[in-house]
Image (cartoon, rainbow, N blue to C red):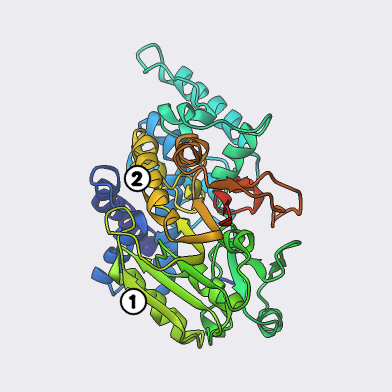
Amino acid sequence: MKKKLSEKIIARQRSLVGEMLAELVPHILEKGHPADRVLARFFKQHRELGSRDRRFLSETFFSYFRWLGWTRPLNLDLTEAASLSVHLDLTEIHPALESDRWPVLSDKTLDEKLAALNELFQGLEKESGPNGKAFQPLEKSDLVFPEFGKSVEFPAETESLFYETLQTRPPTWLRLRNDIFKKMLSEAGIPFEQHPQLENAVSIPAGRSLGALGHGGQFEVQDVASQAVVAIAAPEKGSDWWDACAGAGGKTLQMADVIGSSGKVLATDVREQALKEMKKRARTDGISFIRSQPHDLAKDDPFTKQWDGVVVDAPCSGWGTWSRNPDARWRSDPRDPAQKRNLQVRMLNNAAQCVKPGGLLIYAVCTFTREETTEALERFLESNPEFAPEAFANPLSGEPTNGTLQIWPWDGPGDGMFIARLRRTASE
C-alpha cells in the first residue's frame, strides 16, 4: 500500500509543478530548446529532488506539452493545464494534480477525450453567463500547428489513427545482441514484446527502467524504425560501409554487428560529441573496428574512397518523432521541411560520389513531410540518373515495396521514418 502524503507535501509538490513550468516552458516555446535537455538541466540544479519527485515532474512536464494544443485555448494557468494534461494521459493521478474539475480520460479514445472536453467546457461557458468568453470547440488538428497539413499527406483513412498515435507515448524499443537478455527481462518481471518480423527488436513499456539489469553490451536502445534502416540496407558480412550522419551511432553499431571485423565501417558526423558517444557505446559492445571522424557531408569535400554502401540519415524536420518528443511539434517551423529538403539533396549528391558502381545508397529521414521524402528523392534522382530505387521487402511487415518505404508512427508503434534503397548502376 502506498503511503498517503500529507496535505503539506501535496501543496508543496503542486506548487513545485507551477514553479517548474513557469521557469522551463519559455525555454522550449520561446527559445526553442529541447524539453529533455531543459528538464535535465533543471534536475541537475535541484539535486534535492528524489527519484519519485523527478519521475512525477518528468511525467507531468511531457504530458503538458503533449496536450498543449488543447489546453492552451482554454486559458488555464500552468498548474491547471498540467492537471488536465495528466488526467488525459495517466491512469494514476498524483495527489498534487488531482482535481474534481476533470474526469480521468486516459483510458478513453482520442475521439472520446475530445467529446468529453468539448462537452465540459461548453457547459462551463453556459455557467459563466453572457459575459463569459465564447468557447470554440476543440479539434484534433489543434494538436499540431495550423500549417501542418500543407506538408503531410496521410494514407487513406489514417488521419484519425495518426492523431491517436501522436497522443500516445510509444514503447521503448531495444535491439538485442543476444537471446540471453530476453531471459533476464522475464526474470526481472519486465514485460516485453518481440517484433513479429525483426527478430532482434523487442519493445518494453514506455518509461520502464532497465537500470537494475545493467547493460553489458547485450542490447542497444534503438527505435524500431531506425533498426529497419539497416535491415533495408542489408550490408553483407565483410563489406565496407559508411554511415555518413552517424549521430550517436545506433545504426553504425547495428551495421558493425552484421558486417563483422572482416569488413570496414566508417562513422562520420558534424558533431564530435555525438561521435564520442558512439565510440563509448562501441567499447561497451566490444566493437573495436569502427573508424570515426568529424565530417560535414553538406560542406566538406567528398572522400576519394568508394564504399559498398553509404547510409545518409539526414538532418530533417523530425516530425516523425513527435509521439516520443511532444514538445518538438511546438518548436517546429512550418518552413523547415522545404529548407531541410535543399540540404538533404546536397548531402545525397555528395554521398553519391562515394558509392561504388553497383553499390547502395540508403536515404533515411525521421519524418513524413512531402518535401523531405518524395520531393527530395525526385530531385536527387533527376541529377543522378545512375541511381535507381531497388525493391525490397518491408522489414516491419514483409510486404514488397518499390524501393521506398514510409514508416508511419503507428506502424511500430514508434518513430515515423522514410527510407529509400538506391542502387548505383554497375560499370560496363
The answer to whether residue 330 shows anywhere in this view is: yes
Q: Secondary structure at mark 1?
A: helix
Residue plotted at (33% across, 38% down): 339
Marking on residue 276: 1
What's under tag 2, amino acid-wise?
Answer: Leu
- Tell me which amino acid carries mark 1: Lys
Q: Looking at this view, is 119 or 21 the one in front?
A: 21
- Residue 244, given in percent of the width and then of the height, sits at 41, 62
Relative vertical location of residue 130 with respect to residue 395 in this rendering, above or below: above
Check disc 1: other Cα within 10 Å, few if <14, some if 14-19, many if 20+: some
Q: Position of residue 289 (x, y in %)?
A: 46, 84
Q: Residue at x 37, y 68 (%)?
A: 268
Sequence-wise first label, 1 or 2: 1
Question: In this view of the protein, can residue 209 be seen by the observer?
Answer: no
- Number of labels in the image equals 2
Residue bearing the label numbered 2: 343
| Viewer-side label of 1, 2 | 2
* Image spot of residue 174 (x, y percent): 59, 70
What residue sits 41% from the left and 42% below the top?
A: 329
Residue plotted at (64% across, 50% down):
390
User: To which quarter of the image does residue 200 belong?
Assistant: bottom right
- x and y, in percent, of residue 408 in the image: 60, 45
**What is the distance, in whole Å, between disc 1 and disc 2 at their CAs?**
25 Å
